[in-house]
Amino acid sequence: MLKLNSIAPKFKANSFLNDEFKEISLDDYKGNFVVLFFYPTDFTFVCPTELEDMAEKYDELKLMGVEVLSISTDTHFIHAAWHETSPKVGKINFPMLADPSHEISNAYDVLRENEGVADRVTFVIDPDGIIKFMEAIDDRVGRNATELVRKIKAMIYSRKNPGRACPANWQSGDDTLKPGIDLIGKL
């Protein structure tokens, strides 16, 4: 089972991006923050709304040095067909990884074994390949890319500013905390 601050499992996978198929690996993104965006399957209901939401934040994430990789257990061929037929999924301009062998889903412990699909799980991996965020949510509830962007901004800030912490609901430019005995019982 993966834990926070553990090394992210490496992988290679076929992907669909910009009308092309390409093999990519996690190592291709070393030095960047990476969002692994697992979802159950293509041609469903909640998944396209989440992927559209993430697509709408992708340019902002790229400017922050963050790459997004969506992953399901469908093939890269199915990703291409879905991208061409769904107006929401058609907005995606980040790699859609294929995991039909379930190797990635198993490595990240997100596979529903009796169904052969991934759970709705998000990981954020830092530039050193360390898992800094994990979130799983029920199938019937979609994720919020705006909130994920906020959290990644806080991760980037805290990485650049050791000894500082970002309180709840922190936004870029807000005050941060310097954890220490002088704050105990005063917040």
Image (cartoon, rainbow, N blue to C red):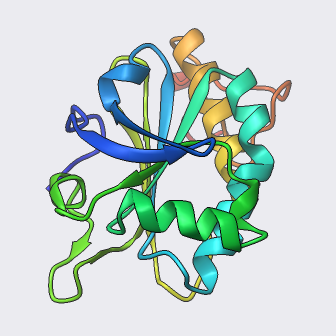
Quadrant of the snapshot with the N terminus:
bottom left
Label count reads 0
x and y percentages locating residue 120 in the rendered image: 44, 71
Q: Residue furthest right?
A: 173
Provide residue 163's location: percent of width, then percent of height: 52, 14
In the displayed structure image, the side of residue 139 where residue 23 appears, left or right: left
**Between residues 139 and 156, which one lies in front from this camera angle?**
139
For the question of whether residue 100 can be seen, the reply is: yes
Query: Residue, x 48% and y 84% (percent of image)?
Result: 139
User: From this viewpoint, is residue 121 visible?
Assistant: no
Which of 162/139 is in front?
139
- Residue under the image location 22 percent in, 80 percent down: 116
Q: Nearer the viewer, residue 170 or 5?
A: 5
**Quadrant hosting residue 30:** top left
Location of residue 149 (image quadrant): top right
Q: Residue 100: image x %, image y %?
A: 25, 65
In which quadrant of the rendered view does residue 64 lie?
top right
In the rendered view, tell whether residue 119 sits above or below residue 62.
Answer: below
Q: Quadrant of the C terminus?
A: top right
Query: Measuring 24% from the left and 60% from the top, which residue is drawn there?
Result: 105
Vertical placement of 171 versus 32: above or below? below
